[in-house]
Every structure is written in C-alpha cells, then in structure tokens.
Image (tube, rainbow, N blue to C red):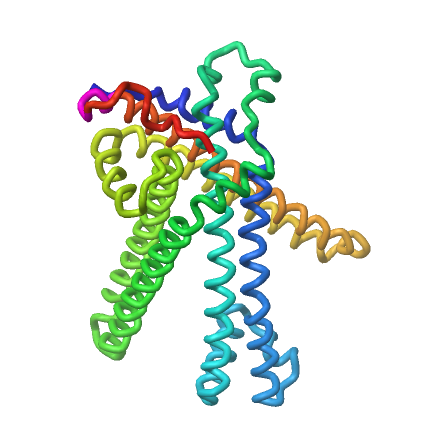
Amino acid sequence: MTHSLPLKAALKRGALVAAANWPLVFVQFIAEATLKLLLAVPTIGGVFLVMLLLQADVEDVLGGGARDIAATVFTALRANPIALVAFALAFLIVLLGGSALTFIVKGGTVSLLATAEVAAGTIERPPLRLEALRRLSRVHIDSFLDACRHFWRRYVRLGGCLLIAYAVTAIVYLVIIVGGYALADGTPILLGWTVIAALASSVLVVWITLVNLCYLLIQMIIAVEDVSVRTAARQLLQFARGALREIAAIFGVVLLLVGLATVASILATAGLGLIAFVPFAGLAVVPLQFAAWFLRGVVFQYLALTALGGYLAQYRLYTRGVAPLRGMPPGLSGQRSA
C-alpha cells in the first residue's frame, strides 16, 4: 500500500520548501529571461536584414502586428535563400545554446529543492516558525554548481528530447492545419474544417502541457534517484500508475493558479495601456510594465517550484510505500543529498 499526502498538505509543503529556497525562484527566472533575450538577438537581426533586402523603412516593417511582421520577414527571407538559411542557422544556434543553459541550471535547481524537501520533516504541520524555514534553506553556490556539473549531461539529453518533441509536434500541427485549409479552401466543408482546426489547437495545448509535466517529473526523478533518463522515464510510468490522482490534483490546482495569474496579468497590462494615453502619466508606463513583467515571471516560477515541491513529497512517500515490494529498506529511496 502506497502512502500520500493530502492535496492541501502537499501544496503547503511545496510552497514552504520553495519559499525557504527563494533564491532558486530568481535563478530560474533569470535563466528563462536570458533565453528569451538571446532569442531576441537573431530575431531583431532578421528584421534589420529584411529592411536591407527590401530597402524599406523601420516603420513600414514594424507598422503592423506581430503576425504582419512575421509574415513580412518570412516572405522577404524566402525570396533570398542565403539570407533565410543564415537567419535560421543563427536562430537555431542561439536556441540550442540558450536552451542548454536553462537545462543545466534546472539540474541545480531541482537537485537543491529535492534535498530541501527531504530535510523538511513535517513542516506542513502547524505551528510554522521562521527558524524552521531558515534551517530548510539549501541554497549555496558551491552545492548548486556541484549539482549542475553532476547532472548536466542527463538534463541536456532530456532537454534535447523535449525540443525534439516540440519540433515534431509543430511539424505535425502545421501539416494538419495548412494542408487541411489548402484542401478545404473554396469548398463547402471550410466551416467544418475551421471547427476541426480549433479542436486541433485545443488538443495541441493539452498535449504540450502533458509533455511539460512529464519533462518536469522526469527531471525530479533523475535528481532524487540519480539515475539515467531512460530509467527515470520507466520509473515515471510506475509513479504515474501508483499516484495518478495525487499528480493530477497538484497539477490541476497549480494550473488553475497559473490561469488566474495570467488573467490578472492581462488585466494589469490593459490598465497600463490606458495610462499610456494620459499626458505625463504615460511616462511611468515603461517602468510599470517592466515591474509587471518581473512580478509575473517571479510568480510563475514560484508556482512551478511549489508544484515541484508537492510532486517531490508525493514521490518520496510513494517510493517509501513500494520499497518493501522491491526488497529495499523503507525510506531509502529519495534520500540522496546534493
């Protein structure tokens, strides 16, 4: 018989572990923000390349929305194969290099969080004391770098599998959508195909969400058990069969919180857009937008680490419950330190 924490206790435990190791929230935020900024470099370079090819003004290229800009850039680059290959190669190099950095950083983050969760005891039970949170902190630069060096190969390999899954999914989706529209164009089934395309987009969102969840859980198992990617994937299947309800509950609550945070972010952005039209007050929009972007990123990272802490707690209890069936002493699995 396997054991598990109630949903409220698991989320509370994950939130406290993440709060005690709050520098990891900012480490993850900086890593992902760095990847986005790196990807902006070849993108902006592609826009300037298009302006040189078309001999157009900046306002003409950037005058429309995001889709118009993307269409203009792609059309201009497609007319010049050498420029298109150079742009695609630059974007791919930056994507792979920046992604590898985030994968390696993730290895240190998950390892330290797993170590902190093991040492948390029964911190989810009241009373909660500040000193207990301070003792729970495991963030140290040496431990973090050691964990990054120890796990980097496996995490980069796992991240490569994630990128391949993204690429295959994008290709299949584009083939279905573009090919379907080409076949349905000018026929009576166009409306029905539009509904099918909307359903396909919904399926895509669900699929990507599940892929990201599996990616996170495999990262967790690698850090806890110190096993290979293949072994971690097999153990994930066993964990999912034995604790599917607990995983789904944590995932559902965190997904709801992310949705609420996204709605709040959209409303805040809309409010800041209205301020931009007010004389003089519009000057404060840029720093306010930066602050909103920063707060949104930190909140999302904290929610992600909270979910990870909850998964860690459930996985540790799950391995304790199945350890006697495997012939291992109870409590041995999941006790590896960084």
Q: Is residue 182 above or below residue 257?
A: below
Identify the residue shown where x is 59% and y is 72%.
44
Relative image position of residue 133 (x, y in whole percent):
57, 21
Q: Is residue 262 magenta?
A: no
| Residue 67 position in % (x across, y down) | 49, 70
The correct choice, above or below, for 69 with respect to 17 in the image is below
Query: Is 121 left or right of 165, judged from the image as shown?
Result: right
Magenta includes 323? yes
- The relative height of residue 284 versus residue 15 in the rendered view (above or below) is below
Quarter of the figure with the N terminus: top left
State the extent of the magenta-drawn residues as a range. Answer: 321-326
Q: Nearer the viewer, residue 250 or 200?
A: 250
The residue under the point 32% across, 27% down is 333
Question: Residue at horizontal 72%, vertical 51%?
Answer: 287
Which residue is depicted at the point 47% across and 56% down?
Answer: 100
Q: Main secondary structure of the magenta part?
A: helix
- Which one is in front, 28 or 204? 28
Observer-nearest of 337 and 134: 337
Picture quadrant of residue 265: top right
Vertical order, 136 against 153 (above or below) = above
